[in-house]
Image (cartoon, rainbow, N blue to C red):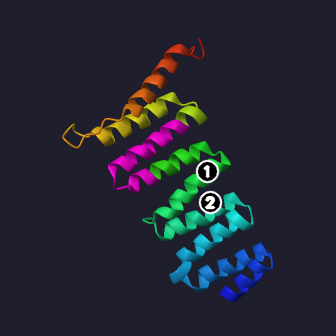
Amino acid sequence: LRARHRYHELSGRFDEARKTLLDLTERAPETAFETWLEIARLDEVKRKAPKEAVAAYRAAAKLRPEHPLPQAAIARLYHELGQWDRLVSALGLIAEDEPDRVERAQLDVQAAEVLELCLADPDGALARLESADRQLVGDGGPEAIFDPAIFEAMERILVRKLLMPVKGK
């Protein structure tokens, strides 16, 4: 099956190459994770089918939920597709699995930017920024980190909320 996949890919028959890889996921479940990543790459790069690539990355993520690559790729593709709601959700899933509090805070800040700038959801953005601040400051002990960028983003959102006319009045 690998040889057939390679032949189809080299011949430019990307749909046939994909079908061969799908067969391989069923016949060799021990390598299914890697095969799903190959399918996702084929969908994204050769077939120019980002929605199908997302589905392939999701299949890989189900097999190894602890592996960071599928979730990061899904978030990147949602950004490219402009699916902002899904991007925020994907960033949240990545943050849940992130052991480093600084990285978790950065993911919350990214989600806040999407909420504020792409989805026009200032309240959601503020909630994510508050979460990022809690990640960094913690209990205020010696390991507390103050990030002025988070404070400035909160301030910017609150000022905009005050200056924007209230809808429905």
Amino acid under disc 1? Tyr
Position of 65 relative to 117 (above/below): below
Quarter residue 37 falls in: bottom right
Q: Residue at x 42, y 65 (%)?
A: 66
**Secondary structure of the residue carrying numbered label 2:** helix
**Mark seen at residue 50:** none
Q: Is there CB contact under 8 Å for labels 1 and 2?
A: yes
Residue where numbered disc 2 is placed: 54
Is 123 in front, or is 137? Answer: 137
Q: Does residue 98 appear in this view?
A: yes
Distance of mark 1 from mark 2, alpha carbons? 8 Å
Q: Position of residue 156 (x, y in %)?
A: 48, 24
Q: Which residue is mark 1?
A: 78
Task: Name the residue located 62 percent from the left edge and 73 percent from the top edge.
Answer: 38
In the rendered image, which quarter contains the N terminus?
bottom right
Query: Is there any visible trace of residue 119 in the rendered image?
Result: no
Question: Which kind of residue does numbered mark 2 sit on?
Answer: Val
* Quarter-of-image position of residue 26: bottom right
User: What range is drawn magenta here?
Assistant: 94-114
Of all residues shown, which one is farthest toward the top? 169
Residue at 80% over, 79% down: 11
| 27 in the magenta segment | no
